[in-house]
Image (cartoon, rainbow, N blue to C red):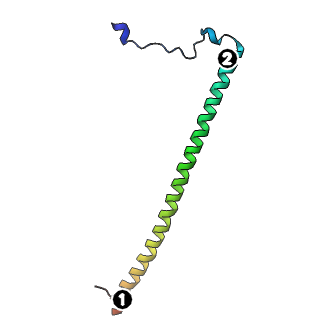
Amino acid sequence: MSATLLPAAAHADDPRDPAMRSAAARARDSATIRRMNQDQLDYVRRRDGRNWQNYRDARDTYADAHAEYRRKMAAWRRAVAACNAGRWEYCDD
């Protein structure tokens, strides 16, 4: 019963694997692993490219909105200063 609770050894990359004894088999395995790694790298680059583009778009949108906010606040501050200076046409309820 305790044997079922012990972790089993993984047989991946087993140097005693009879299927990997020939140089051709090891070369095929290496080429397969290289192709899988390249596919994964391509996937990650595409994914990250989209994420960075989304980030740049959001950053630009925020920058535009913040610039508009600063312009409106500057106009409001000028109106408040004018109102406080006695220019009643700038005073709102």
Q: Who comes first in sequence, dot 1 or dot 2?
A: 2
Query: What residue is rendered at 57% in x and 40% in y?
Result: 44
Q: Position of residue 70 (x, y in %)?
A: 44, 73
The crowding category of the residue bearing disc 2, from other C-alpha atoms within 10 Å (few below 14, some 14 to 19, many at least 20), is few
Query: What residue is rendered at 61% in x and 30% in y?
Result: 36
* Closer mark to the observer between disc 1 and disc 2: 2
Q: Quadrant of residue 69?
A: bottom left
Q: Position of residue 93 (x, y in %)?
A: 28, 85
Name above or below for residue 53 compared with residue 31: below
Q: Quadrant of residue 80?
A: bottom left
Amino acid under label 1?
Tyr
Name above or below for residue 69 compared with residue 49: below
Residue found at the very far right of the displayed protein:
24
Q: Position of residue 45 (x, y in %)?
A: 59, 43
Tell me, for residue 41, which label it has, or none: none
Note whether residue 92 is visible: yes
Amino acid under label 2?
Arg
Query: What residue is rendered at 61% in x and 39% in y?
Result: 42
Cα distance in 3D space between marks 1 and 2: 83 Å
Q: Position of residue 10 (x, y in %)?
A: 50, 15
* Residue ID for mark 1: 90
Note whether residue 86 is visible: no
- Quarter placement of the N terminus: top left
* Residue ID for mark 2: 26
Name above or below for residue 53 compared with residue 72: above
